[in-house]
Image (cartoon, grey):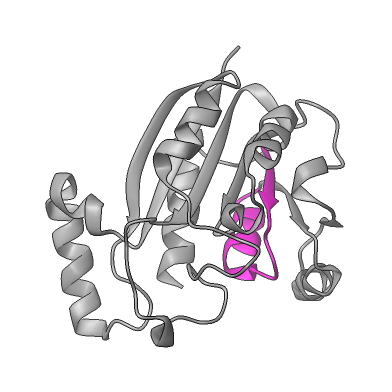
Amino acid sequence: EKGARDLCRRIKDIAGGVSGKSLLYVGSGNDRLVSLPLQDEGALMVNLDIVNESMQDLTAWGARTCVCGDIRRLPFRSESFDIVFSKGSLHHSQPIDDPLQSMIRVCKKGGYIVLVEPNKYMTVPRHRLPKGLAVPTPYEHHLSSRTIVKILKSNSVGDIHTEAFTHAPPGTPGPIARIWEWKGHLLPWLFKYFAFEFLVRGQKKL
């Protein structure tokens, strides 16, 4: 829940508010903790996932627009959205060149791309992670922020920033997690290298 609140807050901060703006949540799954609050803030929210059951779940919970589709071939016109974002989905879609180019294509000029991914350099014992969360399977690989930034820069995205998003990995006891997060925000220059998730944001050039 905290991660969902933090993502909603960061998206609103980056975009200067979401009311009346078109948002595309790529690989949303049935993440109502992000989708519904942004919709309630007045965003024209579109959720997309390749798993149809997830879209049915979100619809049942009150999401207005849910689309079953492939991140590599997003079924939308070019420059349709003010903000295109994903959380923990990109590393399931290797190689990531086509998915990122597809996201950039549907983003308006002057719009924002926001990506949250598990940190390539953060090691967490596998027994403490749900299957598929930051754990490579035969179909995926960890990503580095540098890889994402390189592709964004070569595809008309500028004003790119990278930051730590979630410092404490899943399974960390509550008191320790709170201290870890507090230290991460207090000393971002140091703890960003040990963060569990990173955030990359950029703006599509006019």
- Was residue 148 drawn as part of the magenta stretch in this picture? no
- Residue 139 in view (yes/no): yes
- Looking at the image, residue 51 sits to the left or right of residue 24; the answer is right
- Looking at the image, residue 43 sits to the left or right of residue 50; the answer is left
- Looking at the image, residue 68 sits to the left or right of residue 137; the answer is right
Frontmost residue, 74 versus 175? 74
Residue 75 placement (x, y as % from top left): 87, 42
Q: Is residue 52 above or below residue 187?
A: below
Q: Quadrant of the C terminus?
A: top right
* Residue range highlighted in magenta: 21-42
Q: Residue at x 50, y 54 (%)?
A: 8
- Looking at the image, residue 192 sits to the left or right of residue 116; the answer is left
Q: Is residue 14 above or below residue 92?
A: above
Q: Residue at x 84, y 53 (%)?
A: 69
Q: Residue at x 81, y 42 (%)?
A: 74
Frontmost residue, 1 versus 181? 181
Q: Is residue 126 above or below residue 21?
A: below
Residue 163 placement (x, y as % from top left): 33, 44
Residue found farthest to the top: 206
- Residue 16 in view (yes/no): no
* Location of residue 112 (image quadrant): top right
* Location of residue 176 (image quadrant): bottom left
- In this rendering, the count of numbered labels is 0
Residue 165 placement (x, y as % from top left): 36, 54
Frontmost residue, 175 versus 128? 128
- Was residue 40 drawn as part of the magenta stretch in this picture? yes
Residue 103 placement (x, y as % from top left): 69, 37
Q: Residue at x 60, y 45 (%)?
A: 85
